[in-house]
Image (cartoon, grey):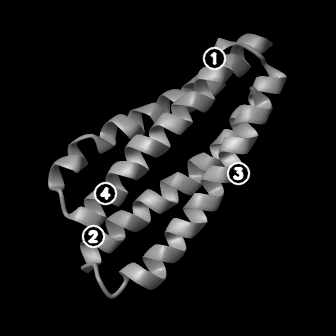
Amino acid sequence: MERTFVVLGAVSAFLAVGAGAFGAHALRARLDAGLLATFEIGVRYHMYHALGLFVAAWAARQWPGALTTASGWLFVAGILIFSGSLYLLSLTGTRWLGAITPLGGLAFLAGWSCIAVAALRSG
C-alpha cells in the first residue's frame, strides 16, 4: 500500500500544482473573485491531502492495517469529492455541486482520524 499512496500522492501533488497555475494564469481574468477564491480553496485542500497521502504511506509502513489503508483511500476520495466539486463549481457555476463538497471534507476528517487511531492503538 505504501507505494500506491506515494504514487497517488505524487500524481495528486503534480495535478494540484497544475491546477494552481491554471487558476492563477488562465482563470484570473475569466472568473469573478468569489469563484476564483472557491477554485483556490480546492487547490489548497488538494495539495494538503496530496501531502496527506505521503503521511498515509508512512503510517501504513509504521502501523500496517485496515485503518492506515483506509486513511489513504479516504484522502483520495476527499480530493476527488471536495476539490473536484469546487473545481467544477468554479468552472461551470453549477451551485448544487457545493452541496456535495462537505462529503469530501468528511472523508478528509475520517482519513486523519484513521491515522490517529492507528497510532494510538500501536502503543
Q: What element carries label 3?
A: helix
Tell me whether circle 3 and circle 2 mark residues in contact (CB < 8 Å): no
* Closer mark to the observer between disc 4 and disc 2: 4
Q: In this view, does 90 lie to the left or right of 26?
A: left
Which residue is identified by label 1? 67
Which dot marks residue 22? none
Tell me whether circle 3 and circle 4 mark residues in contact (CB < 8 Å): no
Amino acid type, mark 4: Leu
Q: What's the distance in space between the residues labelled 1 and 3, CA to CA?
A: 21 Å
Amino acid type, mark 3: Ala
Residue 31: percent from left, percent from top? 28, 78
Q: Earlier in the sequence, mark 1 or mark 4?
A: 1
Which residue is identified by label 3? 10
Q: What's the distance in space between the residues labelled 4 and 2, CA to CA?
A: 10 Å
**In the figure, residue 40 lies in which quadrant?**
bottom left
- Which one is in front, 116 or 59? 59
Amino acid type, mark 1: Leu
Which residue is identified by label 4? 88
Which dot marks residue 35? 2
Residue 13: percent from left, percent from top? 64, 56
Amino acid type, mark 2: Leu
Question: Are there few (<14), some (14-19), or many (20+) residues within 10 Å of tag 3?
Answer: some
Residue 118: percent from left, percent from top? 68, 18
Name above or below for residue 17 compared with residue 74: below
Q: What's the distance in space between the residues labelled 3 and 2, CA to CA?
A: 27 Å
Question: Are there few (<14), some (14-19), or many (20+) residues within 10 Å of tag 4?
Answer: some
* Residue at screen point 29% across, 66% down: 91
Q: In which quarter of the image is the C terminus?
A: top right
